[in-house]
Amino acid sequence: MILEPLAPADRPVPTWCAAEVLVNRHHADRYQHLRLAAPEIAAAARPGQFVMLTAAKGHAGGPVLPRPMAIYSWDAGEGVIDILYAVVGDGTRALATFTPGERMVVVGPLGRGFDIQPDTGKVLLVGRGIGTCSLTGVAQELAGGPAEVVAVTSGRDAGAVIGADLFRTHGAAAVRAVTDAEGSSGVERLRADLCRELDEHPPQQILTCGSDRLARLSAELGARWGATVQVSVEAHMACGLGYCHGCATGPLDGPLESPLVCRDGPVFRLAG
Ligand SMILES: Cc1cc2nc3c(=O)[nH]c(=O)nc-3n(C[C@H](O)[C@H](O)[C@H](O)COP(=O)(O)OP(=O)(O)OC[C@H]3O[C@@H](n4cnc5c(N)ncnc54)[C@H](O)[C@@H]3O)c2cc1C
Ligand code: FES
């Protein structure tokens, strides 16, 4: 996959806050839903952006480096942001110990989110597992507008499929929840289903996150339909701010440094 930075845009101005934890509980089979009171971040968030969450609790210890998490949804009026996360290691295990009323250090919004062109009539969202959390904000942003949203949300089984309800709440024209368990998530099957559904009126933009396999399918469908493709990528991040240079998308030994996922992404144009 060849990743190209999107056209330059104003860099977000992240804020720091010790946000009150409002909710931190199990969601579906294997995820946690975290809601934070973070009015400044909620006011500035754009689809595809992320926050850095610090799991350490003062003297109680815990991982010092913050963990990047997509902003799943936000409500500027209520001043809250929502995050869905999978517990996979020390940092996310520590995040899961926060209880309502505790404060969590959060920095955001960060990164270059999805670039949705004003003249786009239809957008296809293709998400896999927890990666779908980067796409739900697109449906939120486009809700009530002229652009039609078609969403594919894929997972190993029904418990791993994320965002289908939220896509529907935001008025998506079609939501296709596919799973490995049912045999509906394979690339061949998805390609055939999407071509049948969209060949006549294809999307102008395809946005994807969470799977290289689905990113390659998105690139193929983009070429078929003449649609542009953007992908949100993941990388290990220490700062999320463009300082540590640990999240470069390519080797560090060339004369020019590769784009940084946290600063130039996480959303990139998929060029091939
Ligand atoms: C922009 C961005 C948005 C993200 N959004 C979400 C989200 O909405 N929800 C969510 O659950 N996770 C998300 N992640 C991934 C999340 O940051 C990691 O799962 C988390 O940092 C793991 O921390 P840990 O200490 O629990 O695990 P670690 O002990 O650090 O790692 C546990 C396992 O996960 C792998 N891992 C850790 N970080 C990453 C990463 N960034 N990419 C791929 N593999 C990794 C490690 O290699 C290891 O195998 C996002 C990552 C990025 C870069
Ligand atoms: S995480 Fe530090 S530069 Fe990207």
Image: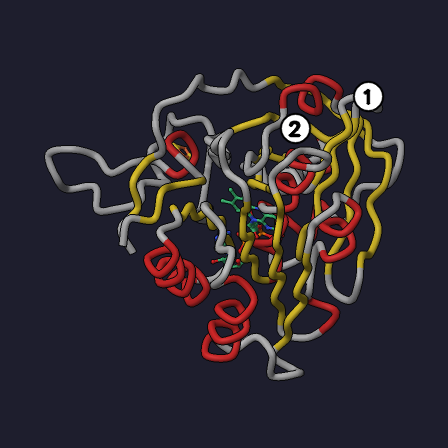
Q: Is residue 219 above or below residue 242?
A: below
Q: Residue at x 57, y 75 (%)?
A: 185
Displayed quadrant of residue 107: top right
x, y percent for residue 201: 51, 56
User: Which quadrant of the picture is home to ligand 2?
Assistant: top left
Q: Residue at x 64, y 36 (%)?
A: 146
Which residue occupies the foreground of this view, 241 or 80? 80
Which residue occupies the foreground of this view, 126 or 10? 126
Q: What kind of residue is marked 1?
A: Gly
Please tell me the numbered disc located at residue 106. 2
**Secondary structure beneath disc 2?**
strand
**Which quarter of the figure is the C terminus placed in?**
bottom left
x, y percent for residue 12: 51, 20
Q: Badge 2: few (under 14), some or many (20 or more) residues near its Cα, within 10 Å?
A: many
Displayed quadrant of residue 134: top right
For marks 2 and 1, give the CA distance: 19 Å
**Which quarter of the figure is the N terminus placed in?**
bottom left
Q: Is residue 130 above or below residue 245?
A: below
Whichever of callouts 2 and 1 sits on the residue coming sooner in the sequence is: 1
Which residue occupies the foreground of this view, 48 or 15? 48
Q: What kind of residue is marked 2?
A: Val
x, y percent for residue 126: 54, 57
Q: Badge 1: few (under 14), some or many (20 or more) residues near its Cα, within 10 Å?
A: few
Which residue carries the number 1 mark? 77
